[in-house]
Amino acid sequence: MSQVNTIANVTDEVDGDEAVDQNISAGIALADVLRTTLGPNGRDKMLVGDGQVVLTNDGASIVDRIDIESPAAKLVSEVAHSQGGDIGDGATSAIVLSGALLREANELLEDGFHPTTIVNGYGEAATRARNRLPELATWENHDDETRRRIVETSITGRWDAERTAFLADLAVRGYQAARSTDGPRLENVTIHGIAGGGTADSKLLDGLVIDTDRSSTSVSDVPAPLPRRVEDANVAVVDDELTIQSPESTPQLSVEDTDALRRLQAFETGEYERYVDTLTTHNIDVLFCQKSIDDRLKALLAQAGILAFERTRQDEVHKLERATGASPIMRPGELNVGAVGHAHVVERRTLGASEFTLVRDSASTQVSLLLRGGTDHVVDETERIVVDAIDLLASFDARAGVVPGGGATEVALAADLRTWSRSIGDRTQIVVDAVADALETIPRTLARNAGHDPIDTLLELRHRHDDGDATAGLDVNTGDVADMYSRGIVAPVRLNERLIANATEAVTSILRIDGIIHVDEPVHEDGDDHDHQHAISGGFQSDSHGYPWAIGH
């Protein structure tokens, strides 16, 4: 997918107030791109490039697909990657909060505040808010119902209520199936999307599912018919190529007479038969090989009734080990009883337009989620939802507290910051109040995107919180200001902690920048200008004039 939008390209040498203005404008521009997607009723963005179309309101997905050329906007975009990668949710909220903090900072700068004063005030306010969060959270009696509510809150609005509940339950069951005594083992979950069918056709399977179209894994191509299904199968996994080994120092083998040729052929035949005899001695029914299998050996394996797969990816070798209990070996001669795995069934199946291999066993620690949808777009969006949901559940288990959603937590933190700021005796008080105003951007945006009056909604929320109702938030489906816990609208406390930390760190980094310098590309001694691009700061592409660098205080 090519990048399809450009955010605030900075190409001139600037410093001082002009640099600050350009940096703030770049960050605000990126936040404005995503602001309309925030919340359950956020509007989708259609991204078009290279003949492909992506329709999504997922903030992290949008940021991945737009061309961000400003170093300052790049810092803000990294908030989405950090939030989404670490938590699994909140990428859009983090960027929207960053944009709100930048807007407040811009007004403070116009009022004569020094950037250092704003940076210090933002830092103190963020610390206060993060310390207050545990007091707003509940920490006990969390079960799978709580997990389902967390996931439903995260994905509500991206699908209808019925499919939202179905996917939330599926994600929770998949996550729980991959847990062990040591906690969640996300590597034990394999997710495949299959176009064709309805979302409700998605299912959780014990064992491993290999997409033989997307993976390099393929069934050995032999004339003999191969079984589509093998039950009660003994499984061997070879972590190498299956062929006759030749000395690496001998690039070419010369045969001088027919006797030598016959001896060579007899040797090769004996080696191939030894491979097959070893496998049949251990009653191997299914063989997975990481690399290729010699054509002659393929035919012999098929004749022996062994279903052989070749070019299995290394990550799938590890998954097969967990799914079957087989220990990978380098050569068939190393096979022993302890290295043989077992599968209740190994089945080749066509789902949609793709070929799959299912390796299932009741004792497997590997599980697979097969996600269905009518079109590739629906499948891709469903896959993003489930992947994010599983990451979000892992974040919740790492710090098992929940806070009320619907903007309730942000309004409560804003009220606390305003109360606390009255005890501050210098200009920092105004900066802390600005952070409180920025936090309330979240409920205001939720109300606007849901079609409700943002001013009336915020006033009602403030009134309820002033009366001591710290769990009052906006139910975007009804427009009611209600107890979020009773409506099941909740989020992990760790999500809000990282949201505040990520947004504040990005904004304060931008505010510290007081100059942007353009450095010309050095000309190589051979006179060549080397017409290739260099990556700066995790993916920033310079133009043909050189490197834009940011200089901090």
Image: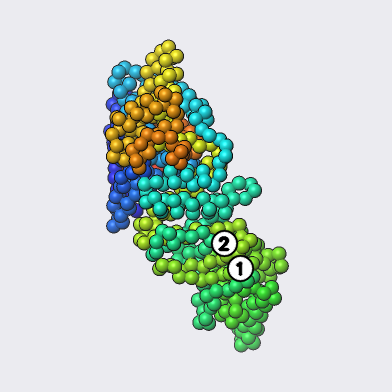
Circles 1 and 2 in contact, beta carbons < 8 Å:
yes
Q: Quadrant of residue 373?
A: bottom left
Image quadrant in which you'd find residue 429? top left
Q: Position of residue 125 (x, y in %)?
A: 44, 23
Which one is nearer the viewer's eye here, 465 or 124? Answer: 465
Give the answer, above or below, for where 47 lies relative to 521.
below
Left or right placement of residue 341 versus residue 9 in this view: right
Identify which amino acid the numbered label 1 is placed on. Answer: His
Label 1 sits on residue: 344
Residue 333 relative to residue 385: left or right = right
In which quarter of the view is residue 332 placed? bottom right
x 53%, y 36%: residue: 401
State whether residue 515 appears in this view: no
Quadrant of the frame with the C terminus: top left
Q: Which badge, 1 or 2, comes first in the chain's sequence?
A: 2
Label total for image: 2
Q: Secondary structure at mark 2?
A: loop
Q: Disc 2 marks which amino acid?
A: Gly
The answer to which of 6 and 482 lies nearer the viewer is 482
Instruction: Say which residue appears at 63% left-offset and 47% top-offset.
Output: 182
Callout 1 secondary element? strand
Residue picked out by circle 2: 207
Q: Position of residue 214 (x, y in %)?
A: 45, 63
**x and y percentages locating residue 90 in the rendered image:** 42, 40
